[in-house]
Image (cartoon, rainbow, N blue to C red):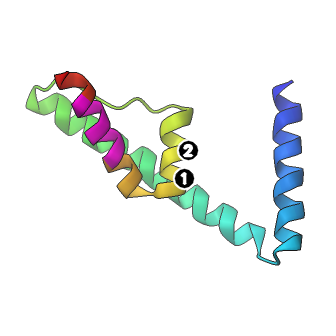
Amino acid sequence: MNVMYIVVFLLIFFILSKIFSFNPYNLLANMLVRVLSGIIFISICNYLIFMSGKNFHVNINETSLLVSAFLGISGVCFLYVFQWILTIM
């Protein structure tokens, strides 16, 4: 069932890219770079927060990768601020 959703998403993505005439490979490459940099940034920040003795971290899951893909490093910073707000409440 999940494979069907992925295929439908990719099909819609490529159809929209043809309609609006942009290169989908550049967009996918850009999102891949943002996701990988987000994973590295989250891992480094989680390690530094752990070493400082604090008790909050951001998990690497689908939500954090999606935020990282669309918003980049600023989105990952937002995840840390949001997690910090949830920790103090």
Counting from the top left corner in percent of width and height, residue 72 is at: 45, 57
* 36 to the left or right of 4: left
Label 2 to label 1, Cα distance in Å? 5 Å
For image coordinates 67% across by 67% down, the residue present is 27
**Residues in magenta, as a range:** 78-85
Q: Are marks 2 and 1 in contact (CB under 8 Å)?
A: yes
Per the image, label 1 sits on a secondary structure element best described as helix
Furthest residue in direction bottom, as rendered: 21
Counting from the top left corner in percent of width and height, residue 79 is at: 36, 40
User: Which quadrant of the structure image shows residue 70?
Assistant: bottom right
- The image shows residue 25, relative to residue 74, as above or below, that is below
| Location of mark 1 (residue) | 69
For image coordinates 13% across by 26% down, the residue present is 54
Please, what is the three-letter code of the amino acid marked with disc 1? Ala
- The image shows residue 10, relative to residue 80, as above or below, that is below
User: Which quadrant of the structure image shows residue 8?
Assistant: top right
- The image shows residue 83, relative to residue 35, as above or below, that is above
Residue 62 sits inside the magenta stretch: no
- Nearest the viewer among 81 and 37 is 81
* 22 to the left or right of 57: right
Per the image, label 2 sits on a secondary structure element best described as helix
Counting from the top left corner in percent of width and height, residue 40 is at: 39, 47
Q: Main secondary structure of the magenta part?
A: helix
Residue 80 sits inside the magenta stretch: yes
| Location of mark 2 (residue) | 66
